[in-house]
Image (cartoon, rainbow, N blue to C red):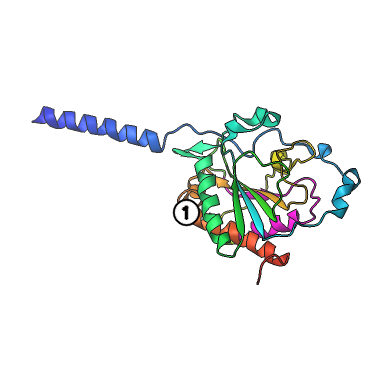
Amino acid sequence: MKKFLSAFLFFGLILSFLFLSQHFFQPTKVTGAPPFGEPETAAPDTLDLYAWMRKWVRPVGPTRVALQVGHLNSAQLPEELARIRGNTGASAAGFTEVETNQNIAEETKILLEEHGIIVDILPATIPEKYYADAFVAIHADGSESTEINGFKSSAPWRDFSGKSATLNDSIRMSYAEVTDLEWDENISRDMRGYYAFSFWRYTHSVHPMTPSVILETGFLTNFNDRQIIVEQPELAAKGLALGIINFLQSESLLQK
């Protein structure tokens, strides 16, 4: 009987270890925005290089918002972005960035559609000449230190729409208020020079008149941040959606 109990306890310990290793001891993959962001010096300084923009007017049609799921189908990125095909995002504690980003995007879409907004959920590859009234690239951060936490967001180096900074401020304010996550001030070149913003270099980027923001929703490698972005994606989505809605209302693109 004692041998049986010892064997039972031994196998129980093995099973417990395997369970914990699957959910808590998965290797951590560190990332942020995809690498190779364009430097500020590469971004054009003036509309004079693109005279057609001065005559541009918003296309007639309903209000449209794009939510990009960061790293989704990155292996299918076009040749011009081949160097970031292998950048599949962060992972920690058995969770991946792509699934985290997608859950938040889907929840945000539901909230925006309640206001009559058309919502496109986009993968890593942006359609050529894609225009929307607001574009948000949704990402989750990662760090070698599990202590680092917080969210951050950024507009492009150059904002020819003249509205990206307003969109960014609106999202930052509402996201902080709803999620109670701390602000991380470490905005990187990879965020400001994000490939989806870089219309002057890539054909698979958003239209230069699209107000655009990249949002790092929190650190997947931090336990407290995961309680929001993984365990309560609807809360992260509420913060993001409210910021977008407030921005669209300020642009008279939604009824109050």
Most extreme residue toward the left is 1
The answer to if 168 sits in the magenta stretch is: yes
Most extreme residue toward the bottom is 256
The answer to if 142 sits in the magenta stretch is: no
Quarter of the image containing the N terminus?
top left
Q: Nearer the viewer, residue 102 or 183?
A: 102
Q: Quadrant of residue 6?
A: top left
- Residue 185 position in % (x across, y down): 67, 48
Amino acid type, label 1: Gln
Q: Quadrant of residue 21?
A: top left
- Residue 220 position in % (x across, y down): 52, 43
**Picture layout, residue 3 above or below residue 129:** above
Q: What residue is shown at x 59% (from left), y 65% (from top)? A: 115
Q: Nearer the viewer, residue 194 or 133?
A: 133
**Picture layout, residue 91 above or below residue 249:** above
Q: What residue is shown at x 71% (from left), y 41% (from top)? A: 128
Q: What are the residue bounds of the magenta stretch?
A: 149-175
Q: Nearer the viewer, residue 61 or 10?
A: 61
Q: Which residue is mark 1?
A: 232
- Residue 16 position in % (x across, y down): 29, 35
